[in-house]
Amino acid sequence: MNAHIINCNETDFFDSFRPSGYLGVKVGVGGTTPQALSKSCRTIYSMQADMKTIRVGDIIFVHAGQKIYGAFKAASEFHETPDTPTYFLSRNIHYYPNPNNPNSGWRDNDSIRPNATGYYRHIAITHFVDNQGNNLCFENGIQSTEVFEIKRRKKIWSIPERWKYTDAARTVRPLMADEAFELLKIIHRANADNPDRLTVEPANFEDYLPIQFILDDRIVTNEKIIEGWVLENIGRNSDLDDAFGPFSSFGNNMPAGYLKFMDIFGYQQLSTGMKIYKVVEIKKDECSFPDDINQLIGYTNWVTQNIASGDYKSVEAAIIAKSFDEDCTNFVANFNTTGNNIRLIRFDYTPPNYDVLDIRRVV
């Protein structure tokens, strides 16, 4: 199970989203210059990667206005709405044209209006019920600043300090599952005198479309596309699972110190209660040695010191890249003899369909 905080406009949340059993996320363009269109493509890739961390059954909190509300449960994954303009369908979001379709892409698309935007990505929600059958969807929210009080007490760590400031592109933010229950305690306390609980009937999205990633390097290469595909396929792709091992909870763009972020972080919960922590970095091209390896080791050191209570053997790491040179593979193979665990995982595109990534563990 994963957990998330989703940012919403306060009026839309109370007037439209919550009564109708869904949450909406806007996608749009900031302008129609080549630079603006290209940037908008990259922003949407990042947003859609964030969306792919959510699975049915996950815990969701909503950040609306100055408060956080919850808990809700994901009743679907994110989908594209039936009224999405053609150019905002995920399969069509790319600046350069598909070589098989010269009229595709945003570069020469005159139908894209400046500042076009809309709630074209929806997720169905319902009220969250715990394993004991208790409805934990409360009426009253808490001040969002209370999250940082919990963070100061080291009960939550995955909310970065810069979350205090505007970051419109980061609409879906991850929490680890155990952190979610710490946040729930604070919301429950705020509702101690209110016995009422919300009941939310989830929206029906049977006519909606799944979000797709463009896995064709002739059209676009972008790390967030690779990241989004990996997030979507954790626990669903046997080659990926063989390379990573299992995850019990995971999120993306997780902080590892001041203004440093791990592409993917999660853990495997063992039956004994112990956790194996996992750090994943993604590179769209060749892994650069030694810089990329040093970056990964820096993240694992931070996790060891700040989360894993100094137990470096409980921290695993992986780099997914297009290729690895001999210096890189030799270093990692030798490094792992010291009790560390770094995995090198190669991905490749799969013509002619370009509908999946080929995954192979190298070390």
Image (cartoon, helix red, strand yellow):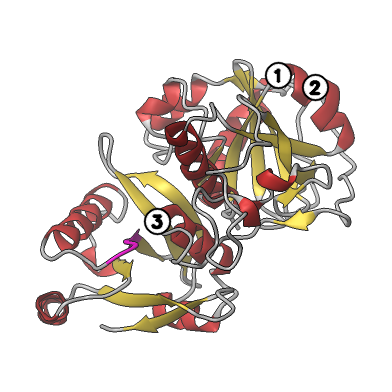
Res 315 quadrant in image: bottom left
Relative height, residue 98 to residue 133 (above, below): below
Relative height, residue 253 to residue 329 (above, below): above
Q: Which mark is residue 14?
A: 2
Looking at marks 1 and 3 on the same chain, the residue that comes earlier in the sequence is marked by: 1
Which residues are the magenta region?
280-285
Horizontal relation, residue 137 to residue 185: left or right: right
Q: Which mark is residue 357?
A: none
Relative height, residue 6 to residue 1 (above, below): above
Horizontal relation, residue 12 to residue 28: left or right: right
Q: Are dots 1 and 3 in contact, CB under 8 Å? A: no
Q: Amino acid at mark 1?
A: Glu
Q: Which residue is mark 1?
A: 10
* Disc 2 versus disc 3: nearer the observer: 3
Label 1 packing within 10 angstroms: few (<14), some (14-19), many (20+): some
Secondary element under disc 3, as helix, strand or loop, is helix
Q: Nearer the viewer, residue 71 or 279?
A: 279
Q: Are dots 2 and 1 in contact, CB under 8 Å? A: yes
Q: Which residue is mark 3?
A: 223
Secondary element under disc 2, as helix, strand or loop, is helix
Q: Tell me if I can see residue 76 in this picture.
A: yes
Q: Residue at x 31, y 69 (%)?
A: 321
Residue 26 pos. (x, y %): 66, 33
Q: Nearer the viewer, residue 346 or 309?
A: 346
Q: Residue at x 41, y 75 (%)?
A: 244
Q: Nearer the viewer, residue 13 or 222?
A: 222
